[in-house]
Amino acid sequence: MPNTLYTLQVFILEGPLSEEFAKANPSIVRTMEIRGEQTLGDLHCAIFKAFDRWEEHMYEFHFGDGPHDYSRGRYSCCGPLDMMSDLSDDEPAGDAAETTIDSLGLSVGQSFGYWFDFGDDWYHQINVLAIGQAKPKAKYPRVISHVGDSPPQYIYEEDEGEEDE
């Protein structure tokens, strides 16, 4: 039986962007495909790579009425739960590394949030564009389109790049 394939559009909503970078890149979007049996942890890795990040940090996926709302569940990275409890009074609904995309009951048109780096606070919105069937020999997850440059993971990296020119 063929695997379910989800086409997701990932937007950066907020993060430590310089005004100059934001002006040059008013929309920063990656469209990707991921199989249903892959996990939110796999999705995190794909987003991490798609935005050219290099240093890992904690992350969460939020399900609710908007990207900052986790009233319908939040799925955290594998960090210690005592550290996670400092961030919220609510226990995570699950471990991102063990939660498959299929298990979320996603539908076309739905959106959910992804929060990366609890210090710099990179907030993303993820929109479900399509649900179909994966190609048997294709490698997933994969980026199928991108808009805008990848921002530096840390704003000071942008300043260092200007000094190198």
Image: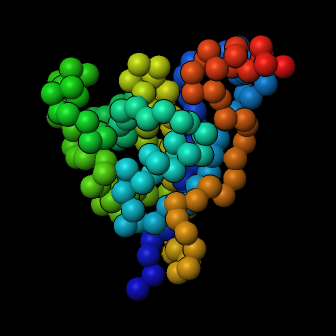
Residue 144 in which image quadrant: bottom right
Q: In this view, does 41 lie to the left or right of 18?
A: left
The residue that appears at 58% across and 33% down in the rendered structure is: 12
Residue 105 appears in the rendering: no
Residue 74 in which image quadrant: top left
Residue 147 in which image quadrant: top right
In the image, residue 53 lies at what x, y percent?
56, 36
The residue that appears at 37% across and 67% down in the rendered structure is: 37
Q: Is residue 66 left or right of residue 54?
A: left
Q: Is residue 32 left or right of residue 115?
A: right
Q: Is residue 95 above or below residue 60?
A: below
The residue that appears at 22% across and 46% down in the rendered structure is: 94
| Residue nearest the viewer, comparing 10 with 155 | 155
In the image, residue 112 lies at what x, y percent?
43, 42
Direction front: furthest residue: 164
Q: In this view, does 143 lie to the left or right of 124?
A: right
Q: In this view, does 33 lie above or below 127?
A: below
| Residue nearest the viewer, comparing 72 with 155 | 155
In the image, residue 120 lies at what x, y percent?
47, 19
Q: In this view, does 164 lie above or below 59?
A: above
